[in-house]
């Protein structure tokens, strides 16, 4: 059995290099391929390196089994899927060979010439380089159309970002397929044009250089600089700590000097970085739990230095033209655990962002103020998109891409969605659209709770609900079909968005597809859930789903007419075909019922467990009073009652519990 996705089939995959990152890459593949019986091979020239790699991999698998992340039989299968070998002949027959060896041109060249001698012409060659251009790595390979860089980030088995870096000779179809392939195995791929260091490492290494130079200039101690960097940039750990954790001193020391030669004169390894690299030392960072205090004046100086550097570095990457701002904004936030650069500039204000970057560039030789930043400042903001668009057979495919929050909706996404759909409606070459989500886990996880947490008055709640409803009403009234391809679960606003579409299809075999979990957080649906769900699946069934927040599987969703069909194969392709069939009239879709129900019953008594009785009372009014109205009146009622939730103690309790403890923790409601 092989794993197949986006025209890439894998029955055997080899990772070359059992050092720092190769074992983690092999571990990730063992996890995603465990149910597909893919043979994995980890090869190295050192028996000691292989032994350490095996111990490292099995330790992580055992820990996953202990925490419940893996079932015991899955953990055992993962261990058994990897062959550790010193013999390159064992990679023969591989569909993919991914090299993760030392960052050395001669070593990589020798590896791939050896790989080429034992692997077939259809085998794909990937290099997990952190800096080197694919043209350099694969210069002696006969067929370079199958070669490219796949740059993983630490820790490779958990960090989802992978930079996909083709050369000028790489097959463009392969690149497109590989982006889909990596998405299908849970990664967040970022296509980057060939450039030394690619898109993200120059930003990370530039921040490390900024930190080290600040220490050399006496602006603060290593511990103080790390502390301020985390506060100013939202980093998970400071630059010095990151270098220690990843063993990154040698790579950064070398990378900065080559960046100086090939990319930008400002880049250059500081003397102290070269020293700790030669002496194989670690930076004197704070111990776990150690508190570091920084004087306000010192913190302000360092904060401005880091923000100016970050804004200048990110904008410089845009000047290079190797990737777009929206993708880089997303990838930096996830790969580096840092505030997204362009979104942060927009929030801070472009005049201030420009001033900070200008101050940094003026005080650092060899770093001209990036032109893209000046253009964004003149325009008043960076133009960012959270929705990607491509066209297939006259159908526009829109993908909501917010992987960090599982494609959660906020007001910016909703405004962008409406603008995209309006453009599609006006385009005579398009017959309709497909709406889907990025990744394999979620279509849309719901509304962004961070935004909901800011509401303080019923009027704010009402206005927000009406704003979301306006977009969904608009989708419902479009003259061209919108087919929702539910690639994963749809919670809350995600399910409400799906219900506003012309038709819904979903991935087959999902134990959890749809849910309206709002009552778990102490409020009611506000984007049409109390009105559209009863009109799609029936009043009795809908009230139970809404009041208990129980999830609906993909098979049940089809049974109750929430979803048209489950799809075992290519979900988007099926949705595109359905869109075309609806547009020609081959498939007739009945519009959602807009007339009132004839009510002969009141809400039944059901067990709502720990949930708020106060919110349940508001929800019952929304469902049953709304059912006695036409759809438009019911939606306005829902908005008013959503606003009413803002004044309850239980909504405050529910939101606070979610923000502090996550979605699985039960809130202790007081029913007020």
Image (cartoon, rainbow, N blue to C red):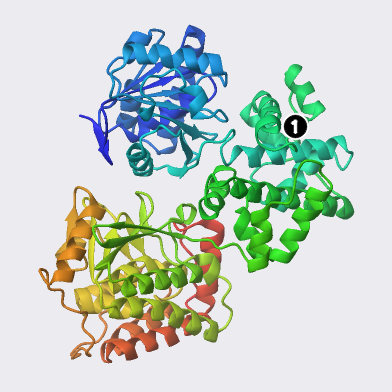
Q: Residues within 10 Å of mark 1 (few under 14, many from 20)?
A: many
Q: Residue at x 26, y 54 (%)?
A: 572
Q: With 341 as the anchor, is 384 left or right in this view?
A: left
Figure quadrant of residue 374: bottom right
Q: Residue at x 36, y 39 (%)?
A: 172
Q: Position of residue 391 (x, y in %)?
A: 31, 58
Q: Position of residue 593 (x, y in %)?
A: 21, 83
Q: What residue did someone put label 1 on?
A: 268
Viewer-proximal residue, 254 or 321? 321
Figure quadrant of residue 37: top left
Q: With 114 as the anchor, is 656 left or right in this view?
A: right
Residue 602 in the image: above or below residue 87: below
Instruction: Check disc 1 and report its element: helix, strand or loop.
Output: loop
Q: Position of residue 28 (x, y in %)?
A: 41, 32
Q: Position of residue 517 (x, y in %)?
A: 38, 66
Q: Is residue 492 visible?
A: no
């Amino acid at each position: 059995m092989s794993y197949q996705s986006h025209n890439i089939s894998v029955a055997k995959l080899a990772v070359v290099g059992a050092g720092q990152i190769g074992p983690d890459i092999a571990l990730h593949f063992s996890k995603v391929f465990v149910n597909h019986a893919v043979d994995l091979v980890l090869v190295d020239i050192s028996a000691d390196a292989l032994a350490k790699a095996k111990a490292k991999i099995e330790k992580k698998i055992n820990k996953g089994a202990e925490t419940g992340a893996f079932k015991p039989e899955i953990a055992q299968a993962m261990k058994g899927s990897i062959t550790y070998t010193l013999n390159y002949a064992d990679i023969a027959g591989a569909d993919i060979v991914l090299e993760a060896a030392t960052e050395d041109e001669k070593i990589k060249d020798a590896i791939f010439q050896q790989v080429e001698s034992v692997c077939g012409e259809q085998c794909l060659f990937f290099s997990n380089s952190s800096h080197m251009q694919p043209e350099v790595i694969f210069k002696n390979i006969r067929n370079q159309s199958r070669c490219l860089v796949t740059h993983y980030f630490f820790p490779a088995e958990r960090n989802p970002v992978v930079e996909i870096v083709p050369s000028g000779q790489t097959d463009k179809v392969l690149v497109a397929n590989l982006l889909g392939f990596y998405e299908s195995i849970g990664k967040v791929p970022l296509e980057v044009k060939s450039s030394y260091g690619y898109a993200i490492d120059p930003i990370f290494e530039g921040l490390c250089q900024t930190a080290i130079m600040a220490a050399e200039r006496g602006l603060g101690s290593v511990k103080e600089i790390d502390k301020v960097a985390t506060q100013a940039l939202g980093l998970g750990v400071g630059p010095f700590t990151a270098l220690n954790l990843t063993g990154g001193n040698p790579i950064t020391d070398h990378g900065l000097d080559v960046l100086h030669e090939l990319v930008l004169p400002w880049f250059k390894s500081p003397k102290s970085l070269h020293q700790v690299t030669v002496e194989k030392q670690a930076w004197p960072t704070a111990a776990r739990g150690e508190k570091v205090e920084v004087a306000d004046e010192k913190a302000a100086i360092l904060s401005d230095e880091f923000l100016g550097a970050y804004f200048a570095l990110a904008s410089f990457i845009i000047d290079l033209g190797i990737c777009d701002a929206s993708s880089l904004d997303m990838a930096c936030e996830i790969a580096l655990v840092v505030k997204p650069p362009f979104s942060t500039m927009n929030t801070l204000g472009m005049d201030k962002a420009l001033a900070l970057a200008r101050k940094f560039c003026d005080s650092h030789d060899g770093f001209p103020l990036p032109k893209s930043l000046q253009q964004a400042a003149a325009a008043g903001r960076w133009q960012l998109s959270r929705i990607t668009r491509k066209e297939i057979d006259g159908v526009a495919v829109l993908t909501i891409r917010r992987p960090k929050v599982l494609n959660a909706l906020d007001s910016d996404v909703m405004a962008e969605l409406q603008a995209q759909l309006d453009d599609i409606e006006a385009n005579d070459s398009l017959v309709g659209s497909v709406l889907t989500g990025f990744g394999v886990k979620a279509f849309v996880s719901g509304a962004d709770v961070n935004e909901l947490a800011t509401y303080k008055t019923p009027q704010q709640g009402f206005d927000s609900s009406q704003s979301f409803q306006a977009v969904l009403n608009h989708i419902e009234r479009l003259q061209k079909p919108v087919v929702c391809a539910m690639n994963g679960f749809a919670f809350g606003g995600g399910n409400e968005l799906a219900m506003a579409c012309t038709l819904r299809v979903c991935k087959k075999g999902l134990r959890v597809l749809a849910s309206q979990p709002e009552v778990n957080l102490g409020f009611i649906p506000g984007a049409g859930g109390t009105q559209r769900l009863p009109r799609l699946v029936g009043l009795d069934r809908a009230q139970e789903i809404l009041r208990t927040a129980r999830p609906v599987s993909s098979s049940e969703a089809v049974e109750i007419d929430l979803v048209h069909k489950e799809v075992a194969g290519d979900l988007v392709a099926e949705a595109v075909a359905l869109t075309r069939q609806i547009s020609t009239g081959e498939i007739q879709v009945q519009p959602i019922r807009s007339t009132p129900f004839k009510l002969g019953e009141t809400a039944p008594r059901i067990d709502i467990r720990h949930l708020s009785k106060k919110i349940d009372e508001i929800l019952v009014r929304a469902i049953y009073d709304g059912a006695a109205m036409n759809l438009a009146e019911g939606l306005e009622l829902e908005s008013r009652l959503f606003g009413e939730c803002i004044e309850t103690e239980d909504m405050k309790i529910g939101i606070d519990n979610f923000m502090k403890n996550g979605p699985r923790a039960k809130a202790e409601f007081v029913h007020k």
